[in-house]
Each structure stands twice: as C-alpha cells, then as structure tokens.
Amino acid sequence: MNGDLFSPETLAFLAAALGRTLWMTFIGCTIGFVIGMGLAILRRTRAPLPAPLRWAAALYVETFRRIPFLVILILVLFSVQAFAPDLSLLGIATIAVTLAATAYLTEIVGAGLDAVPRPQIESAEVLGLSWFDTLRHVVLPQAWSVILPPAAAFMVMFVKDTALASHLGVVELAFAGKILVNKGFSPLAGFGAVLVLYALISWPLGRIASSLESRLAASRNR
C-alpha cells in the first residue's frame, strides 16, 4: 500500500472495510429484527403452553441488554470457536451483532405492540378473530408506525458500535484507519478518511430514519 490515499489499492482496502461494517450492521440487525419480532410476540401471548419460553425470552432480552457489546463479542468468540473453529472473525462478529441487536429490537417491537389500544384488541376478540388474525389485521398495522422509526435509528447507531469488532481482528472501518496510519499515512489522513466514510453511511440513514418518523407520525395523526 503506497502513500496515496486515493490510489486504487487504498480505495479498494477502504471499500472492503466499509463492506464489512455494512455487512455486520445490516445482516445482524435484519436477523435481529426478525428474531426480535418473534420474541416480542411470544412474550405477549397469553397461551399457557409457551410460558417457559416467555420466561426464557425475557431472561435473554434483559441479560443481553445489560452486557456491553465488547463483552458479547468476546463471549461469542470463545463460544463459537469451541464448536466452529473455522468460522471467520467476520462471521463471529456478525453473530455477536445479531445477539445484541435481537435484545434491543425485541424491546422496540414490544413497545410498538403495547402502543396499540387494548380496547381494539378486545373488540377483535369479541368479533371472533383468532389470536393470529388479531395480530395480523389489528395489532401489526398500527404498531409499525411506532416500531420502524426507533428500529431505523437503532441501526444507524449500531453502524458505529461495530467498530468494537476491531478487538477481534475484524478489519472494519475503524481498524482500517489504524492500519492506514501504521502503513505511513498521517493520522489526519487515515482516520479522516474513516470519518468521511462513517458520515457517508450514517447521514443518509439518519435522514431516512427522520423522514420515516415524520411520515408515520403524520399518518397516525390523520
């Protein structure tokens, strides 16, 4: 790698680091959202059969929301390597992101579900709708406007938190800046390039989240 920040080699290196950051964020948060949706729904079912599952889901969410992400990364590293020693560090970091994102997104989805007025759910039950139909036709259509804005904002926040994956040796954006400095670039140039790339990711995502929140808030007020 030469000293030209805009050389094809350096740009390809930064693009690869950017790709890893985006991969961890979007894959981890997307899977976390899907699992979180399931856990949030499970915790609010009243059927007696899944009661132990509800307790396990609550324990998982409360535990992982209180563990620093760096600790989750280290725990996942040693746990996964014991069973899958050939899994890449990027894969291990993505699993850690998924575990952390699932816990937080479960709470976000749960808040959206709880925002639906209880009388509407009771009315659906009186009309003979099953639990699943009530969820699909009554609860979720109203809950989306409460769920999506904070979920999008959480994803924007987690773009920056993935920098902690550098402690595992994953060459994401923050670690790429350190490597550039070690290769002879000035700290201003190396980490300045990283700063610009983080801004290019976070700013449009933040704008999308803000726009989504405004539009959904307007739809709720109509």
Image (tube, grey):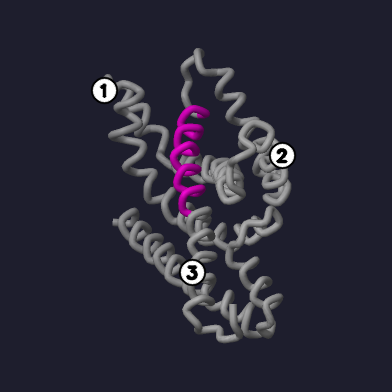
* Residue 169: mark in rendering: none
How far apart, in angstroms, are the residues tagged by discs 2 and 1? 52 Å
Look at label 3 and name its amino acid.
Answer: Ala
Check the picture and name the quadrant holding the C terminus.
Answer: bottom left
Look at label 1 and name its amino acid.
Answer: Leu
- Quadrant for residue 177, please give it: bottom right
Look at label 2 and name its amino acid.
Answer: Phe
Check the picture and name the quadrant holding the N terminus.
Answer: bottom right
Residue positioned most to the front: 1
Q: Earlier in the sequence, mark 2 or mark 1?
A: 2
Residue occupying image coordinates x 56% and y 22%: 53
Residue 26 position, x and y percent, is 46, 53
Instruction: Confirm whether the magenta stretch covers residue 42.
Output: yes
Q: Residues within 10 Å of mark 3 (few under 14, many from 20)?
A: some
Residue occupying image coordinates x 64% and y 38%: 85
Q: Which residue is mark 1?
A: 127
Residue occupying image coordinates x 41% and y 52%: 148
How far apart, in angstroms, are the residues tagged by discs 1 and 3? 55 Å
Q: Earlier in the sequence, mark 3 or mark 2?
A: 3
Secondary-structure class at tag 3: helix
Please tell me whether mark 2 or mark 1 is closer to you in this view: 2
- The residue stretch that appears in magenta: 26-43
Q: Which residue is mark 2?
A: 78
How far apart, in angstroms, are the residues tagged by discs 3 and 2? 29 Å
Q: Which residue is mark 3?
A: 15
